[in-house]
Image (cartoon, helix red, strand yellow):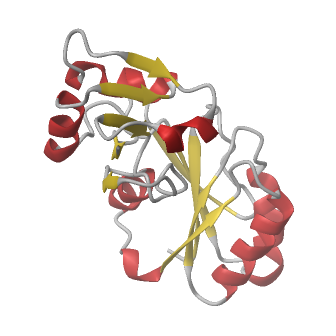
Amino acid sequence: MKIVGVGCGPGMMTGEAIRAIGEAAEVHGSARAIELASEAIRPGCPVHEITDYRALRTLDDGAVVLSTGDPMLSGLGYLPGEIVPGISSLQVALARLHLPWTRVVVVSAHGRDHAAACAEAGAEVARGRIVFLLADPTFAVDRLAGVLGADSPGARIAVCESLGYPDERIRVGTVGDPPIPSSPLFVVVAGIF
């Protein structure tokens, strides 16, 4: 089996990903991942929307499992098999904001304890790091701003929405006036930058 990153938005698949998907005996993925990869899937190839993530471990060698963004950034990279990297929201957000990776720490709040993620992000920003935070639709950016304001009042917060899509939007604010997401598909970058 191959776990293939399809990028964080349309047109962000690598050549290696396109080849792997085109050679697949069958393709499995979320509705969003299937949509992103649709042009690379050969006609007649069986395509299955994932309903049981545990069953993915039992797929045959010719199967391709699609992962949005990059499989190793909070994706399906935990599955056995070959990993084909993709263009992640981390790569796109940092490129759009002209920020170097060397100061970045990744924190995930996607489907996890938001308070703990905010505390971790606050500690990292206080150490001089830039935090890339994977958010879910219920993540409250103003809560993060409150945590950052205590130890890093000069920190900035960027909300990067729908990266790679036609309606992509990036807004930068301060801990006193943080941008509030208007899309459920967003990531947050925070720190002194």
93 relative to 58, above or below: below
Q: Which residue is depicted at the point 58% across and 36% down?
A: 55
Q: Looking at the picture, tell me which residue is in the foreground, 170 or 90.
A: 90
Left or right, residue 73 beside residue 183: left
Residue 30: image x %, image y %? 51, 28
Residue 34 seen from this side:
yes
**In the image as oriented, which residue stretches furthest toward the top?**
44
Location of residue 112 (image quadrant): bottom right
Residue 166 seen from this side:
no
Location of residue 175 (image quadrant): bottom right
Residue 77: image x %, image y %? 46, 55
Location of residue 153 (image quadrant): bottom right
For the N terminus, the image quarter is top left
133 relative to 162, above or below: below
Q: Which residue is depicted at the point 63% across and 67% down?
A: 107
186 relative to 99, above or below: above
Q: Looking at the picture, tell me which residue is in the foreground, 2 or 75.
A: 2
Q: Which residue is depicted at the point 38% across and 69% down?
A: 99
Q: Looking at the picture, tell me which residue is in the foreground, 138 or 47.
A: 47
Q: How many marks?
A: 0
Left or right, residue 4 beside residue 21: right
Q: Looking at the picture, tell me which residue is in the foreground, 148 or 84.
A: 84
Residue 142: image x %, image y %? 79, 54
Q: Which residue is depicted at the point 36% across and 27% down?
A: 27
